Image (cartoon, rainbow, N blue to C red):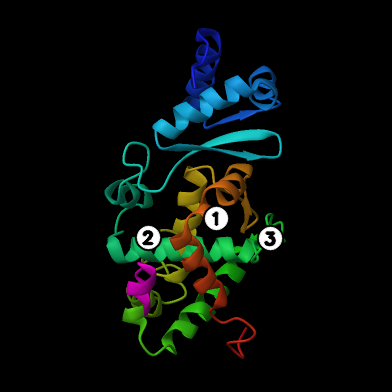
Amino acid sequence: MHYSREKLGIALDMLKIMLETQSISRSDYPREFMRYDQEPEVREALDFLTEKLGLLICGYQDALYLCPEINNRAFQLSNTDIKINLGRGFKNPEMYTVFFVMHVIITEFYREAVNDTFRQKLPKDQLLETVDKKVKAMSELEDLDSISEKYQFNFKTIHDVWVSLPRTEFKDDSDEIKQRGTSSKVAMINATARFMMQHGLVEEHEDAIYLTGRCKAIIFEAYNRNEIQVGISNFIEGLASPEGSEDA
């Protein structure tokens, strides 16, 4: 399709805004938001540009969010970048465990075939207990290595890391609990929440996690399009479910 110089210029200006701020909201950029909503040529031009860059425009309520598609090397963080973001002590096994906790967070906010969250917040102590139950359920599976291979996700490594951790660890010669690092389950939960906050996916208030509009948009538009991600989430959601575990 051919786009007029004017409409292509508008689309490029909007892309620039989204690359700088990650979003265009009705409140912050009302003119641009309305153009995407009401001018088909602008919308198609912007969608074309983002598609060529391996990006997705994810809409949720009164905002448009930008996120990279799966395997976008230009705009996605590498594993090395992620471990640096997570902090000292994070190697591949700990990083995989953070990914698992992120999946658990999503399955705790969403249920199958529901397009929006069914809860407003997730207390972090409840998240920790849920991860405990799901890892315990993994312990009861016969061949975790084969399951890991099937879903292309390191469930065996995640299981081994999590069960090796104490619930909490105290600072030297102190009654104060360590909140950071990789040496306890509490620290791992905190690292996951902190990483997601750094990337605008969650907010935290009074030791509870809240999903942001950006996170909800990405889940609705991008996460659910990828069969592997959906398969992983369905498997994790089924762990320690009422049908599969007396502890649920």
Lateral position of residue 202 relative to residue 71, left or right: right
Q: Is residue 176 visible?
A: no
Whether residue 150 is in magenta: the answer is: yes
Tell me if residue 39 comes above or below residue 175 in the rendering.
above
**Residue at x 48%, y 64% (from the top left corner):** 101
Q: Amino acid at mark 1?
A: Asn
Answer with mark 2 or mark 3, whichever residue precedes in sequence.
3
Answer with mark 1 or mark 2, whichever residue precedes in sequence.
2
Lateral position of residue 139 relative to residue 32, left or right: left
Separation of disc 1 and disc 3 at Cα? 11 Å
Dividing the picture into quadrants, the one containing residue 164 is bottom left
Q: Who is closer to the viewer here, 107 or 188?
A: 107
Q: Who is closer to the viewer here, 3 or 34?
A: 3
Tell me if residue 60 comes above or below residue 180 in the rendering.
above
Separation of disc 1 and disc 2 at Cα? 31 Å
Q: Amino acid at mark 3?
A: Val
Residue denoted by label 2: 181
**Residue at x 33%, y 80% (from the top left corner):** 146
Q: Position of residue 29 (x, y in %)?
A: 65, 21
Query: In this rendering, which labeled residue sits more in front, label 2 or label 3?
Result: 3
Residue that extends furthest to the top in the rendered view of this protein: 6
Badge 3 element: loop
Magenta residues, dominant SS class: helix
Q: Which residues are magenta?
A: 147-155
**Residue at x 60%, y 81% (from the top left corner):** 241
Q: Who is closer to the viewer here, 95 or 231?
A: 231
Answer with mark 1 or mark 3, whichever residue precedes in sequence.
3
- Whether label 2 touches label 3, CB < 8 Å: no
Q: Position of residue 226 (x, y in %)?
A: 47, 55
Residue denoted by label 3: 114
